[in-house]
Image: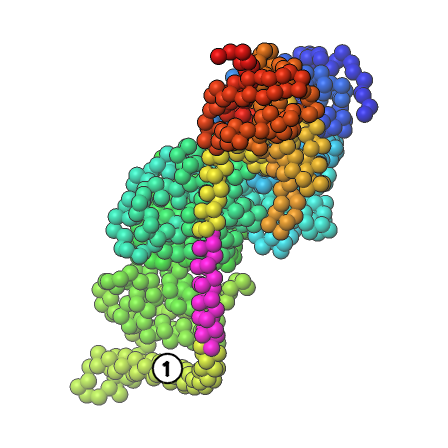
Amino acid sequence: MSKKPSTRKRYSTPRGGDVERIALLDRFPVVGIGASAGGLPALQTLLESLPSDTGMAFVIVQHLSPDHESLLPSLLAMRTAMPVLEAREGLALTPDHVYVSPPGTRLTLERDTLRLGQARATRGPPRIIDEFLGSLAESAPGRAIGVILSGTGTDGTHGLRAIRSAGGTTFAQDPASADFDAMPRSAIHAGGVDHVLPPEGIAAALARLAHGPRATLPPPSSSSDMSAQDLSRIFHLLHTRTGVDFTHYKPSTIHRRMGQRMRLRRTARLADYARYLEEYPEECEALGQDLLIHVTSFFRDPEAFEALKQHVIPERFRERTPGNPFRLWVPGCSTGEEVYSLLICLMEYLGEDIATTSIQAFGTDLSEPALAQARTAVYPESIAADLSPERLRRFFVRTEGGYRIHKSLRDLCIFARQNVVADPPFSRMDLISCRNVLIYLDPVLQKKVLPIFHYALNPGGYLLLGNSETVGASADLFSLVDRRHKLYRKKSVSYRPHLSFTYREPVAERPEDAPHSSRRGAPERDPQREADRLVLASYGPPGVIVNDALEILHFRGHTGPYLEPLPGAASLNLLKMAREGLALELRTAIREVQRGPSRVRKEQVRVSGREGERRINLEVNLLQASSSTREHYYLVLFEEAPEPPASATPRGANAQTPRGQRPTTRQEVERLHEELRTARQHLQTLLQEQETTSEQLRAAHEEAQSSNEELQSTNEELETAKEELQSTNEELTTLNEELQNRNTELSQLNSDLNNLLGSTQIATVTLGDDLRIRRFTPMAHEVLGLTAGDVGRSLRDLQFPLELPDLERAVSQATSQLLPFEREIRARDGHWYSLRLRPYKTLDNKLDGVVMTLLDISRLKHSLDEAQQASEYAEAIVETMHEPFLVLDGHLRVLTANPAFYAAFQATEARTLGQPIYQLGNGQWDAPQLRVLLEEILPRNTRLRDFLVEHDFEQLGHRRMRLNARRISGREVGTQRILLSITDVTGQT
C-alpha cells in the first residue's frame, strides 16, 4: 500500500489569521466517524481514498483502551495529506483537518468546538460514538455527516438516527467488507443509514458531496411559477410511486431533505432533479423514505408516561365492563418503541389482572421498513440506557447483539401501513398517542387529522400529543387535561365533524389562490374592491348560500326578518328556519332551479312575522360548482317588495263594485286567488315530482328484484364457502394448538438445556467453521474470560489464560477426520484442563462447526502425582530392603522382585517375572496351604503372618523361611496387588 508523503503541516494547528477559513466555520460540513474493533484498516482505507481538499472537517471517535497511549493519530497521518490532530478541550474545527478522540474520554461538539469530558458510567458498553454523533446533529443540523465503520456492539446506532433526523447524511460500512459487522449492521437494521458502502465507496461519496454542485432550492415562501411547477411535478412523481402526497408536509423539512438528495445526485436545479426522478424511479423511493422522519425511543419523555399511568389508565379502567377491550392507537409509530412503551405501562398497572384483561394495540406508519422492524421487535443493546433493569428483565429477551420484546407483548400488537390523512382510521379507541407527527404537517392537514382522531376515540377518550404540538383550530373537539404533557380529552359535540378519508385540497386553501400571500407585510387593499364591498354590505339584498340538502352554508347580510331558528335541536335547514308563508315558495323556487333555469324570481310573496304580514320578493340563483365536486350550491336572496299604489285600481272599479261590498273584501278575494294560484302551481310541481319518483321507484324495484335474486345465489355460495371456512378453521385451530404445545415443549427444552449447561460446571464453547464463537456456558466465562460481547468474534482475535497451541489444526482435524480430539493443557495459574474437540452435527447429520469443552482435572492430576510419588517411594523402600520381597498379581504371578530375592535364592529376572509363585525354582513355594492363604488375601483383605516354609535347595541347602503377605494398591487405579516378604530364619528356634 502506497504511503503518502508526510509534512510538518500535518501536526500544525490552524492559523488564526486565515480569515477566509474562519469564515467557513458556520457552513462547512462536519463528518463524524465511529469505529471499534477492526476499525483501523477501514479508517486507513477511507482516509487514503479521500482527497485532501474536500472542505470538510473529520472527527474520528474509536473505542480505545484508557490504559495505553493511542498511536492512532500517527498511524492515520501516514495515510493522508490532511493534518491529523488529537482532540483537545476547546479546539475549534477547521476544514480539511482530521481530529482523533483521546482514549478514555467523552468527546462532544458545541458550536464547531470540541469539548472533552470524563466518560460516563453506563449499565452497558460505553456509548461514546452515540454521544458525539448526537451532539454533532444538534450543533450542526443539515451539514452533519455520520459514518459507522467496523466494530462490535451497537454504539453509533442512535447517533446516526439523530443525524438523519436533523437533515444530515449517514453512511455505514458494507457488512461484507467489515472485519466486525455488528456496529454497521445494527445501524442499518435501525433504519438510520442512507448509504451502505465499503470504505473506498464512502470516500468517493463524500468527495461527490464536497465537489458536486450546490443544490439551489427556492425558499418555502417563494412564489416562482417555475419553482412551484417543478415542486408540483416532484410531488406528483412521489405520489405516483409511493402513494403519499407530500404537498402539505412541512416545507422546511421537504426543502432540507430534497436538497440533501440533490447534492448526492449532483443536481443543482429542481427541474434537473425532477428529470432524474423520472429516469430513475428508485430515487423516488429513497426520497420518500428520507422525507419520513423516524425519531423515537422507549419511554421518550418519561414524565408523560408517568402521567398516563397515574391518571389516564386508572380512569379508563375504573368503569370498564368485563370483556370490553382497552384499545390504543399510535399513528406514526415508526419502529414501534412508542407502542411497546404504552403496553409496558398498561401491564405494570394491571399486574396480575393482565390475564383477565383484553388489550388491543395498533401501530401505523407509512414506512414498510420501519413497520418490519416493529413486527420483529428486535432492538439494539443501546436501549438499556432508556429502560430500567427491571423492565429489561421482565419485558425483554436477550438476543445476539440486542434485546427482543417478550412474546406476550408482541401478541397484543398489530402493525399496519396507513396514511392517517387519506386512509380510514381505527375506531373505539381509549387512547391515541400521536407525538411529534403534527409538527411535520401544515395547518391544512392538521385540520383534517384532528377530526379523524376525534372520530376514532371513545367518549371520554384521550389524545396525547408532542411537547411542541396543540389541537389548534380543533379546540372545540378536545379539552385540555394536562398542559405540560399535552394531554387532551375528547369533547362531546352536538354536530358531527366533517371527515374525508380521501384527501382533496380545499380551493380556498390552495397556495395558488393567494398569489400575493408571499409578499412582505399585509397586502394593499384595492379601493374599488373595498368600495364594492361596502356598497354590497349596505345596499345588497340579504341572502343565504345552501347546498342540495338545503343546509345553510353561509349567511349574507341581515336575514332575521326572513329566517328564524326554531326551538329544540339546532338546525340550519333553510325550510325549517323560514318564517310562516315563505317555506312553500322557497321549496317551489328551488325545485324549479334544479329542473332547468339557473335563476327563478318570485314577487309579492306574503310573509307573516311579528310586525304582521308583509310582501317580499324572492330570488334563487344556481352557483357554478367546482369541477372537482358534483354538489350544487344555491344563492337565495330576499328583498322587501313595495306596496302596490292606489292608482293601480282599475278605472271604473267603484262602479263595478257591488253595492254594499267594501274595497277590503275585494283585496281579500284577490289575495285568496293569488294563494290558490300558488297552491295549484305547487300541487302541479308535486304531481310531476311524484310521477318522476314513481317511475324511478318502479325501475329501482325491478333492479332490487334482480339484485335480490343475485344476492340469494350469492348467499348460497357464501353459505357453502362458510362451511368450508369453518372446516378449514377447525383444522387451523387444531394445528395452532399443536404448534402452541410444540412451542411450549421447545421453550421447556430450551430452559432445561440452559439449566443443564449451567449446572455441568464444564466450560463449553460452540464454534463455527470459521472459529467464530456462537455460544458458551457460564463456566467458559470463568475459565476463558469470555463475555457476551465476544459472541461472533473469532478465537484468533482473543487472548486466553490457557496455552492452546495448534488450535486451528486440532479443529480442522476434528471436522475433517470426524474424530474427537483430546489433550491435557495447563493454565497460567497452574490449573490443568482436559481439552476436548468434537464435531458439531445438526439433526440432519451435517457438520456445522465444532464443540470445545474444557474439564478441570487439577485434582485428578494432583492425585495421580501423589500416587506416583507414593509408588516410587514404596518401590525405593522395597529395593533397599535386605529381606527378599515379591509383588504378586491376583493370579499369584510375580510382578516385581527386589534384588535381595535374586541374591538370596540365586534366581534370575527372566525366570522370575511373570511366573506363578508356585512354579519358581524347583517348586519350593508350591504348598497347598500357602496357595489357599495367598488366594484369600485379595478378596477378603486378609494377611499372611509368620507362615513357615522349609525346603532343601540344591545350591543353598536346607533353609527355613518365614513368610508375611498383605494386600496393596497397584500402579493402575482400581488394581490390587500382594506384597510378600520372605525372611530366612534358618538356625533360629
The location of residue 234, given as percent across then percent down, is 64, 49
Assign the magenta stretch its main secondary structure.
helix
To which residue does mark 1 refer?
Answer: 686
x, y percent for residue 726: 44, 70
Residue 742 in the magenta stretch? The answer is yes
Residue depicted at x 55% and y 48%? 372
Quadrant in the picture for residue 986: top right
Residue 127 shows up from this direction:
no
Three-letter amino acid code at the position of disc 1: Leu
Residue at image location 24% in from the left, 86% down from the top: 657
735 or 154, which is in the foreground?
735
Q: Is residue 906 above or below residue 588?
A: above
Horizontal and vertical percent for residue 7?
78, 14
Start and end of the magenta stretch?
A: 720-743
Residue displayed at 28% across by 46% down: 315
Q: Residue at 71% of width from left, 16% of height from top?
A: 74
Q: Is residue 307 left or right of residue 800?
A: left
Task: Examine the rendered structure and indicate whether residue 614 appears above or below residue 982.
Answer: below
Residue 797 image point, x, y percent: 66, 27
Is residue 824 toward the left or the right of residue 582 in the image? right
